[in-house]
Image (tube, helix red, strand yellow):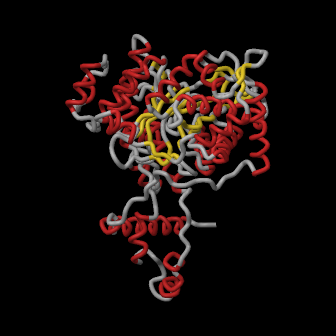
């Protein structure tokens, strides 16, 4: 057992090491900071090859025998012309031959871009990217801590935070601007706030098919031309084309067709809820949701064989005690990781949901639930993990301070994907032999000085100080620190990647409701 003097000695040694490390900081800065963008996952495999084949057979059976109800005319005409059939129950079915053709022809191995270089997302293989999301109707007010209706300014603020945080690689619409008077105002201003607030790739949405062309027009103006945008698309459309179980959404299918026609990448999303709108078993829910996802992808491919369509299989769990959706369970984490394996089986670019905590605030529950689900999705190799930052309350709320905390979390998770380097330079056997005979520590070794930045990603706000230093600084918990950091960013960071003349053109053509004075330093 340690006595007081032992404890004091250890604390003094820690402080001494900390001072030495700080003194070498200027040298260490010459090494590049680790980059977390697009690291490969794929180390976690909750399904083996036999199980994947079983699910695949079930998917084909569901598409060919059961099919979909309420298919709108555009889907019926497009799919039946290619070999699909309406059965006796007026359900639209997809024969195996059609699915085979689509899986062979769908676009693969492409890149989603930001408006500014350096944010490229490789939508292929097991490259992992993490982002925001949720489309929450409420925000946790950063000052009062109370839930309230979310606004367009809140959406713009969320985009600005994501723009400043290195480990959040894309901005997926986090909040619904509930102060917009109608659906067209919502769609146009959501696109504008997302594009002006964040230079990274943006996942946005449309509520009506006729709105897609207006969103496309905005994107083409920002890009300089339609051709520029098609070459490097910096926006994709989230689209829930089905209502589980196995029922098409007419408006969403129209939106998907318009996106495919115009060349906007589109996410074919399905949201079966285990035990409610999909089977109570993980295997059954996975099979149904994969079938629902692939049906949308086939339709978009038939509309435009060059369409960029993302496999958005996103089944969620139901807490069978309450009937409500739960995003923070171990089963949910396992289920979402399994969707990444199915996408890899079909070799399709994919996105998923992970980080949909049930906690209402950025507390310990939020931390462990998000960390578990995002880690498994990343380790499984999901290409785009949405809802990985900022969301609270089972996707019903968003907290601005959560982006700051989750950025730290995501950095640690993504660094855990990095392959270990084992060679002569890292084994350091000669250095070990020399140092144990002389200094007895590695603090001043050239490798230590060089690699302290190149090999380690340090947290932005997580506290690694001694408890004496923490207490002397006010004993703040991570939420207090995160709120302070969020306020600092929001008071100083106003992105200007869209030139003023382009912004003026957008405001002249569209009913932009975000005042310019809110987009500048006071």
Quadrant position of the C terminus in the picture:
top left
Pinpoint residue 41: horizontal percent, then vertical percent: 58, 53
Quadrant position of the N terminus in the picture:
bottom right
Number of marks in picture: 0
Q: Which residue is pictured at 53% across the width and 69% down the height? A: 421
Drawn side of residue 118 relative to residue 429, left or right:
left
In this orientation, does residue 409 appear?
Answer: no
Pinpoint residue 117: horizontal percent, then vertical percent: 34, 47
Q: Which residue is pictured at 49% across the width and 69% down the height? A: 9
Name the residue at the top extreme. 181
Pinpoint residue 87: horizontal percent, then vertical percent: 76, 19
Q: Which residue is pictured at 35% across the width and 30% down the height? A: 219
Q: Which residue is pictured at 31% across the width and 35% down the height? A: 223
Pinpoint residue 169: horizontal percent, then vertical percent: 44, 44
Classify residue 62 by image quadrant.
Answer: top right
In this orientation, does residue 200 appear?
Answer: yes
> Which one is in front, 5 or 33?
33
Q: Is residue 53 above or below residue 155?
A: below
Classify residue 366 by image quadrant.
Answer: top right
């Amino acid at each position: 057992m340690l006595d007081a003097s032992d404890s004091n000695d250890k604390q003094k040694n820690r402080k001494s090491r900390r001072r030495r490390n700080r003194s070498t900081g200027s040298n260490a800065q010459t090494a590049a900071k680790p980059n977390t963008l697009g690291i490969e996952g794929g180390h976690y495999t909750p399904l083996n090859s036999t199980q994947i084949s079983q699910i695949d057979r079930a998917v084909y059976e569901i598409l060919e025998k059961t099919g979909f109800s309420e298919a709108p005319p555009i889907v019926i005409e497009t799919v039946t012309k290619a070999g699909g059939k309406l059965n006796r129950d007026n359900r639209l079915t997809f024969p195996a031959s059609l699915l085979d053709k689509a899986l062979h022809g769908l676009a693969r191995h492409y890149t989603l871009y930001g408006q500014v270089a350096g944010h490229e997302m490789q939508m292929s293989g097991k490259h992992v990217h993490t982002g925001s999301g949720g489309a929450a109707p409420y925000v946790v007010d950063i000052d009062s801590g109370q839930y309230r209706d979310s606004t367009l300014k809140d959406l713009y603020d969320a985009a600005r935070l994501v723009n400043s945080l290195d480990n959040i690689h894309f901005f997926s619409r986090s909040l619904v601007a509930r102060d917009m008077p109608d659906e067209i105002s919502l769609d146009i201003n959501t696109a504008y706030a997302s594009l002006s607030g964040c230079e990274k790739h943006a996942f946005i949405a449309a509520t009506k098919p006729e709105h897609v062309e207006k969103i496309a027009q905005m994107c083409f103006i920002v890009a300089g031309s339609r051709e520029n945008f098609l070459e490097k698309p910096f926006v994709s459309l989230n689209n829930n084309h089905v209502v589980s179980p196995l029922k098409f959404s007419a408006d969403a299918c129209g939106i998907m067709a318009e996106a495919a026609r115009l060349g906007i990448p589109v996410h074919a999303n399905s949201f079966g809820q285990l035990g409610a709108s999909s089977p109570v078993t993980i295997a059954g829910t996975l099979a149904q949701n994969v079938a629902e996802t692939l049906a949308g992808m086939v339709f978009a491919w038939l509309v435009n064989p060059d369409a960029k369509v993302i496999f958005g299989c996103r089944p969620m769990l139901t807490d069978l005690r309450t009937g409500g959706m739960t995003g923070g369970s171990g089963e949910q984490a396992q289920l979402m990781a399994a969707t990444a394996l199915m996408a890899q089986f079909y070799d399709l670019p994919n996105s998923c949901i992970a980080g949909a905590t049930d906690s209402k605030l950025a507390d310990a529950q939020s931390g462990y639930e998000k960390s578990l689900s995002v880690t498994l999705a990343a380790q499984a190799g999901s290409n785009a993990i949405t809802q990985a930052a900022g969301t609270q309350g089972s996707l019903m709320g968003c907290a601005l301070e959560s982006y700051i905390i989750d950025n730290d979390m995501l950095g640690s998770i993504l660094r855990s994907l990095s392959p270990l380097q084992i060679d002569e330079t890292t084994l350091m056997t000669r250095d070990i032999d020399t140092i144990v005979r002389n200094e007895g520590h590695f603090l001043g070794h050239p490798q230590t000085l060089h690699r302290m930045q190149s090999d380690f990603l340090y947290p932005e706000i997580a506290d690694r100080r001694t408890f004496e230093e923490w207490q002397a600084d006010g004993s703040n918990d991570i939420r207090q620190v995160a709120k302070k950091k969020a306020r600092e960013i929001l008071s100083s960071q106003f992105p200007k990647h869209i030139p003023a003349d382009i912004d003026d053109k957008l405001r002249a053509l569209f009913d932009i409701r975000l005042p310019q004075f809110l987009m500048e330093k006071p």
